[in-house]
Image (cartoon, helix red, strand yellow):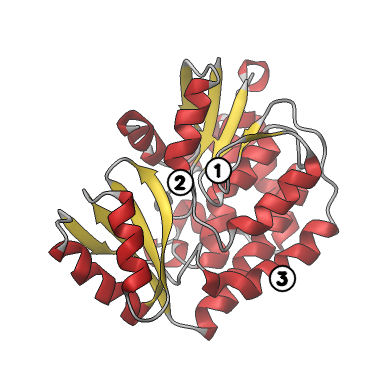
Amino acid sequence: MKAYVFPGQGAQFPGMGKDLYESNAVARELMDKANEVLGFRLTDIMFSGTAEELQQTKVTQPAVFVYSVAQALSQGEAFQPDMVAGHSLGEFSALVASGCLRFEDGLRLVYARAMAMQACCDAVPGTMAAIIKLDDSTIERICEETEGLVVAANYNCPGQVVISGEKEAVMAACEKMKEAGAKRALPLQVGGAFHSPLMEPARKQLAEAIEATTFHTPICPIYQNVDARPHTDTDEIKQNLLLQLTSPVRWTDSVLQMKADGMTEFEECGPGQVLTGLINKC
């Protein structure tokens, strides 16, 4: 059984998608459609923009989404997923690839999500940090004991967990993590505290956009970040998309569950090979 997986914010790079646009008619049509839906030329930034321009949340999220979906659907009849999963933002790419969302609807939701998250970032300064080689229970305990708001946000693979929250709390937790034996505690270059309670206002905004969007039964199960379980029920899928904003990404459990359910091979669609590395470590 084959799983297709889709990366999230952070996988972007300057020039992403240019070769695919020039070589594949399906991808070209989707990217041109994205420019039309968004009302600005996203492809110009993807192909020719600087790393700084690509790092803007309102650009990054639609750019990674568009490239990921285009790479998957450009395969034509060869694209035959038995299961799909996406890391954070990548969950929306997976939903479009599995037929649960139309491309245009998925893009509009991604853009609404990006703008809502950006508003949260502007309102309360937050950040994230990667904790390397420290067990999950110790990380969770230190987060609970640290003054201020800091939580485990991404369980990426064994030995790699990302924490998220208020800047001072994250920095304080990083020091405690290193004292507890973490090999490294690396602050990430991100705009805010994603997958933490600081994103609650964004969840309320996204709920309105989701309720106004038509979801279809996907052609295969999607393993969602919130519970690492396979879903095909559209009401469950919508609820999990909302919970995802303030809940941790359970990527390690998702990979292990897909394997337990019969995954024998996987393919990453999108910029880079971040998820391929994480899956191999799982």
Q: Position of residue 159 (x, y in %)?
A: 27, 44
For the C terminus, which image quadrant? top left
Q: Is residue 228 left or right of residue 136?
A: right
Q: Give the residue type at disc 2.
A: Met
Tell me the residue at 75%/63% (across/down): 207
Kindly identify which numbered label has been placed on residue 204.
Answer: 3
Q: Nearer the viewer, residue 110 or 203?
A: 203
Q: Position of residue 177 (x, y in %)?
A: 21, 63
Q: Are marks 1 and 2 in contact (CB under 8 Å)?
A: yes
* Residue 43 higher or lower than 256, as above or below: below
Q: Position of residue 200 (x, y in %)?
A: 61, 72
For the residues marked 3 and 1, what is the alpha-carbon distance in whole angstroms? 27 Å
Kindly identify which numbered label has been placed on residue 67.
Answer: 1
Nearer-N-terminus badge (3/1): 1
Kindly identify which numbered label has been placed on residue 16.
Answer: 2
Other-residue count near label 2 (Cα within 10 Å), few / some / many at <14 / 14–19 / ≥20: many
* Residue 74 higher or lower than 41, as above or below: above
Nearer-N-terminus badge (2/3): 2
How many numbered dots are placed on residues in this image? 3
Q: Position of residue 151 (x, y in %)?
A: 42, 65
Kindly identify which numbered label has been placed on residue 225.
Answer: none
